[in-house]
Amino acid sequence: MTDGDPIIALDAMGGDNAPGAIVEGAVTAARQLGVRVALVGQTEAIERELARLAPRPDPITIVDAPEVIDMDEHPAQAARQKKQSSIVVGLRMLKQREADAFVSAGNTGAVMAGAIMHVGRVRGIERPSLVGLLPFAGKLTAFLDVGANADARPEYLLQWAQMAAVYMEHVWKVERPTVGLLNIGEEESKGSAVVQEAYELLEASGLNFIGNVEGRDVPLGGADVIVTDGFTGNVVVKTMEGTADLIMTELRAAITSRPWYAAAGLVLTPAFGALRKKFDYREYGAGPLLGVNGLVFIGHGRSDARAISSALRMAREAAQSGMLEAIREAAPARVVAGTPREGGDSREEVEAT
């Protein structure tokens, strides 16, 4: 770890709005929250954005990384070949303890592949998992996996639940978080063979496991932690995003369809604003990649400055909470033969990301 306040390495070149929105988010976090940020990327481009936002806050430094991994590049190949990219350089800083956490809104697969290659996994964790934070029903739910692993084994689901429970306890201060398993029914006998076996593992785990939860329970906050495979999780999250966009679009159309509706809409504007803020992913900024041997946070590709600032705040809180140390202690002790648990991982596994 670095001395003093945590240093957050930020991929300045990752995301649809990079580097402008990324640098602006870093400046906001530094000015308003005092977050120490190392902007990793092409120095000239970063300097140009900092000049636009002058004066530069003292907590911001620049680490040069001349290469960029684009959103449409093959993740593992790009992470392996572009060793001077902002993603790889930032992850190496994390590995070498020159930073306490790494944040990127860039190529998700490349961040995961790079984290496995350059940071390694927590000993005993077989596959890292990406967490989505769902702010519904007056509470925050850690929903995973949301796309890092299309397929899952029963033991993966158990490990993800264990890590997510630690995350919710340490970062969000949820005492003994409830854990649910996403399934097509509440009955123990429902679902695929993988899900049924995962149910048995979770039931015997010592976690606060409440059983199966159905898709309708996800937006209702059915549990503090909900686990599923990455294919299903990604579909669920994107379906909810599309549904929310549709509702807001239809609501706006309905309000403007009649003059008296518009008048009522003006009165309700503060309520609509509060509702929008409650469901806004930018309030949380990024989700943790649990299972890698360092604090890695991945944001939405369309992240704006507000989302980046929130992600930096979350990364700092995670670094200060002792979350990673707690995950290391909670991780199972077993080691899979021929597969390193710390440091690098096999080429086959990285190619699977």
Image: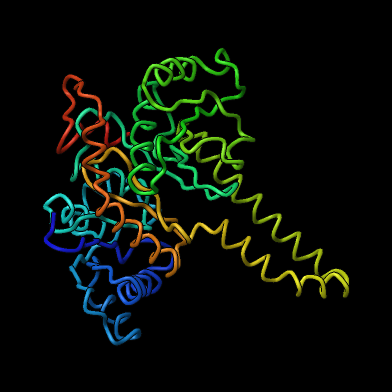
Q: Residue at x 50, y 47 (%)?
A: 140
Please provide percent x and percent y for residue 175.
Answer: 40, 39
User: Residue reaching furthest front?
Assistant: 175
Q: Residue at x 50, y 27 (%)?
A: 181
Q: Residue at x 54, y 24 (%)?
A: 212
Q: Is residue 74 visible?
A: no
The mark tally for this picture is: 0
Residue 62, image x, y percentages: 20, 72
Query: In the rendered view, would you say 352 is above or below 74?
Result: above
How far from the left and from the top, in percent, is residue 272? 68, 65
Task: Name the colour scheme.
Answer: rainbow
Closer to us: 83 or 146: 146
* Quarter of the figure with residue 50: bottom left
Closer to the camera in the image, 44 or 8: 8
222 vs 27: above or below: above
Of residues 332 and 192, the one nearer the viewer is: 332
Q: In the image, residue 234 lies at what x, y percent?
A: 50, 41
